[in-house]
Amino acid sequence: NAGVTQTPKFRILKIGQSMTLQCAQDMNHNYMYWYRQDPGMGLKLIYYSVGAGITDKGEVPNGYNVSRSTTEDFPLRLELAAPSQTSVYFCASSFTGDQPQHFGDGTRLSIL
Amino acid sequence: AQSVTQLDSQVPVFEEAPVELRCNYSSSVSVYLFWYVQYPNQGLQLLLKYLSGSTLVESINGFEAEFNKSQTSFHLRKPSVHISDTAEYFCAVAPGGYNKLIFGAGTRLAVHP
């Protein structure tokens, strides 16, 4: 009963490095989302996808890229890490846009 | 533009006392309203939602929230809290659908013995 699985749980990057945050869901959900959560602030939507091959920008997409080659996976890529991207990243999924979102446990990313 | 304001960043309360977490929103269109709970080092879990119909909605663990359209509020209440309710609570709105949630900054509920 995995639900939404995010890896890694923690990561420290140097400025300018790149990395991919992984997100997988086993609920056959069509919609998937990436959020970032900064201290004292709510979650902000980075990118979302309504199905394999379809992605769209959210509120704060700059500095990130996504792809959705399968229904199950929705990786988030940081190409040139910057200190402003230090945050906790959450992946979520839902069956349709009218269903509640299920969240993963998050990836805590620090960029130094 | 839609926005969500949670009026208290932290709410300390003693066990078995009542609690209210306040949420106001602004929107020019009809919205769906949600409360999510986040326990330490975990993702968010849906606590309750308002889509339409009765303005009072309840969760399975004793929380309730009331949609007040005239005051654009969706406050969360519980008549008697437990230590296990200690968590961060997020109010969210979705204008026209679930797929673009707008979150408030969160309220940290700390229940003390």
Image (tube, helix red, strand yellow):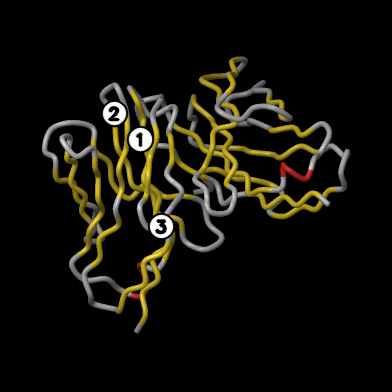
Q: Name which residue type carries label 3.
A: Thr
Residue furthest out toward the top: A53
x and y percentages locating residue B79 in the rendered image: 18, 67
x and y percentages locating residue B81 in the rendered image: 27, 71
Q: Is residue B49 above or below residue A76?
A: below
Dot 3 falls on a residue whose secondary structure is: strand
Q: Which residue position is annotated with label 3?
A: B107
Q: CA distance from mark 1 to mark 2?
A: 6 Å
Q: Is residue B37 above or below residue B57?
A: below
Horizontal relation, residue A16 to residue A24: left or right:
right
Q: Residues within 10 Å of mark 1 (few under 14, many from 20)?
A: many
Horizontal relation, residue B112 to residue A78: left or right:
left
Q: Name which residue type carries label 1.
A: Val
The chain containing the residue under callout 2 comes to B
Foreground pick, A67 / A86: A86
Say whether disc 1 or disc 2 marks the residue closer to the N-terminus.
2
x 11%, y 38%: residue? B54
Q: CA distance from mark 2 to mark 3?
A: 21 Å
The chain containing the residue under callout 1 comes to B
Q: Is residue A105 above or below residue A96?
A: below
Q: Residues within 10 Å of mark 2 (few under 14, many from 20)?
A: many
Q: Which residue position is annotated with label 2?
A: B31
Q: Which residue position is annotated with label 1?
A: B93
Circles 1 and 2 in contact, beta carbons < 8 Å: yes
Dot 2 falls on a residue whose secondary structure is: strand
Q: CA distance from mark 3 to mark 1?
A: 15 Å
Q: Name which residue type carries label 2.
A: Val
Circles 2 and 3 in contact, beta carbons < 8 Å: no
